[in-house]
Amino acid sequence: MRPTSHQGMGLSGYTLMQRAGEAAFEQMLQHWPETCAVSVICGKGNNAGDGYIVARLACQFGMRVQLIALASPEMLQGDARTAFEDFVAVGGVVAPAGQAIEHALVVDALLGTGFRPPLRDPYVDMICRINESSAAVLALDVPSGVDPDTGAVSRLQGDALAVRASITVSFIGRKIGLYTGAAKAFVGELRIADLGIADASRSISTPTSLLTWQYKQLPTIALYAHKHQRGKVVIIGGDLGMGGAVLLAAEAALRCGAGLVSVVTQAEHRTALLARLPEAMFIDSESADLGQTLDAADFMVIGPGLGRRAWGAKLFALAAAAATPKLIDADGLYWLAKAEERPLNEIFITPHSGEAAKLLDVDVSEIEADRLNAGSKLAQRYACNVVVKGPGSVVVTRQGAQICAHGGPAMATAGMGDVLSGVCAGLLAPLYATTEQSLVCDQFAQAVALHSASADLAAQELGPHSVLATDVTVRIPTVLAGKAKLNG
C-alpha cells in the first residue's frame, strides 16, 4: 500500500496520488490519442483514489467519463476520499456497480498493491465483466487480481482470473510480481512511472533484482587461450529414442564458449551426433574409463534425454559421485529427487514448475503461487544454484535472487530446456577451467538471460508460433556479441 508520505522526500500522500493519476492519464493519451470516452472502475483504497484522479483529469480534458464505483464513495478515507471529492467538484458523476461498461477504454482502479489472493465477490464478477467487455484496459499500479509480490493469480473454475490489461502503469518501484508467474499473461505492456522520486524506476520493491542480458559482462578470451583453458564439458543423456536432447545441449555449449564438448549417450546416436555436430566427441556410455572422464571434465550436464530406466539411473549415480561441478536438468532432476545423498561439488539445477514441485514434494499450484519462494527453498534444500523456468524465470544463487526480464510463450516448445543446459555449460565451463570461479553466480544468471534473449530474437524474426529450440541456438552468436536489437 502506498505510504501517506514518501520517506525523506517531504511529499504528501495526496501529492503522490496526484502524480500517479497524472502519469497514468498521460500514458492513456499517448497510447489512445483518439479516445474521447473512458470507463473508470474504482474499488475502495488508494488504487481507487488514483482512478478518481484519472477520471477527473479526463473530465477536465473534455472526455465522456463513466465512473463505476464497486464500493460506495462514502467508504473512502484519507487521500482516496479527497480524490473522489475533487472528481465530483468538476462535475463527475458516480455510477453504481451494476451499470454496464459503456466505453471501449477501461481504467482498472479496483485493487492495488495490498491485494493477496484469493479474489472475493464482488471483485470476481467485476473483473469478469471487464475481461468480457473487449475494451482496451489501462491498469493502475497492478492489474486487479495479481499479487504484486509473487505474481500469483486467483483461480476461477481452474482458470487464472485477473484483469487482462493492455497496459499497466506501475508507480514508484517495480513490483516483482509483474515479472513472473501467471501474472505475466495479464500485465500487457508495462510502464514504470517514478513519480519524480529519484532512482525509483530502477529498483524493484523487494531484495530481488531484474535480470537482463548484459553482453559486456561476458569474460574476455585470453589471447594465449587454448581449447582446454576454455573448458571441457561432458553432457550425459540421450537414452534410446531421445538423442536430440544431448545434441541440442552440446551445440549450445559450443556456441557459448566451451572449448571441448563430449557427449555420453547411447551408441545408436553416434552417427547422428557426428553428422550434425562434428565438433563434439562421442563417448560410449559403457566405456570402462567413463568415471575418469567425468572427473577430468571442468563441467558436466546430466539429464537431457536421460530417461527413467536403469540406464539413466546408473549414469546419474556415476555423475553424482564425480568430483566435477554439474548442472542437473530434465530426467536428471527425477533421479535427484530420489537420491539419498546430495551430488558432489557445486550443483546447478534448472527445473520447470512440475519438476520443482517433485523436488520439494509439493503440488505444482504451490510452486506457481510463489515461484520466488520455491526457488529459495530449492537452493536451500539442495545447496545449489537454481533457475525455476517459466514466465519470468526465477534465478537463485548465493548472491541473491533475480527475475529474468526476457522470454515469452514462444519458448514453450520441445528442447528449450536442453538448449539452456548447454548455454549454462558453455558460459560456466571456462570459469572452472581457469581461476575465475568468483564469476560463477553472475554467469549462471547471465546464461539464463542469454538463452531467453535469444528466444526473444527468434520470436521477433519468426513469429512466436514458429520458434524451435534450434532457432534459439542459431541466434545465440548475435545476442552473445551484443548485436541483437531486441524489442522492449
Image (cartoon, rainbow, N blue to C red):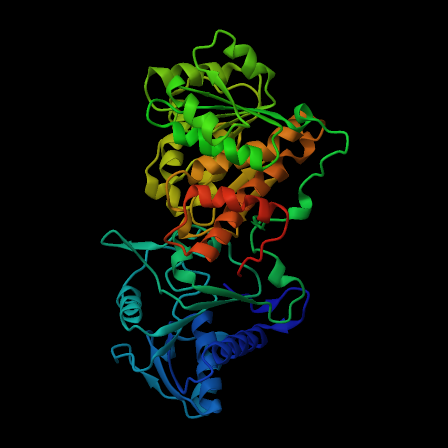
Q: Residue at x 55, y 46 (%)?
A: 449
| Left or right position of 72 against 89 | left
Q: Residue at x 47, y 49 (%)?
A: 392
Looking at the picture, tell me which residue is in the foreground, 238 or 130: 238
Q: Outermost residue toward the left?
A: 157
Q: Outermost residue toward the right?
A: 224
Which quadrant of the view contains residue 356? top left
Q: Classify 306 as above or below 100.
A: above
Looking at the picture, tell me which residue is in the foreground, 65 or 424: 424
Q: Classify 332 as above or below 289.
A: below
Q: Classify 149 as above or below 245.
A: below
Image location (x, y in percent) of residue 241: 33, 26
Image location (x, y in percent) of residue 275: 46, 28
Q: Outermost residue toward the front?
A: 275
Image location (x, y in percent) of residue 50: 47, 75
On the question of residue 232 being in view, the answer is: yes
| Left or right position of 192 against 241 | right
Looking at the picture, tell me which residue is in the foreground, 15 or 463: 463
Q: Residue at x 63, y 39 (%)?
A: 442
Which quadrant of the view contains residue 52? bottom left
Number of numbered discs present? Answer: 0
| Left or right position of 290 against 312 | right
Q: Residue at x 41, y 49 (%)?
A: 467
Looking at the picture, tell me which residue is in the foreground, 463 or 449: 463
On the question of residue 330 being in view, the answer is: no
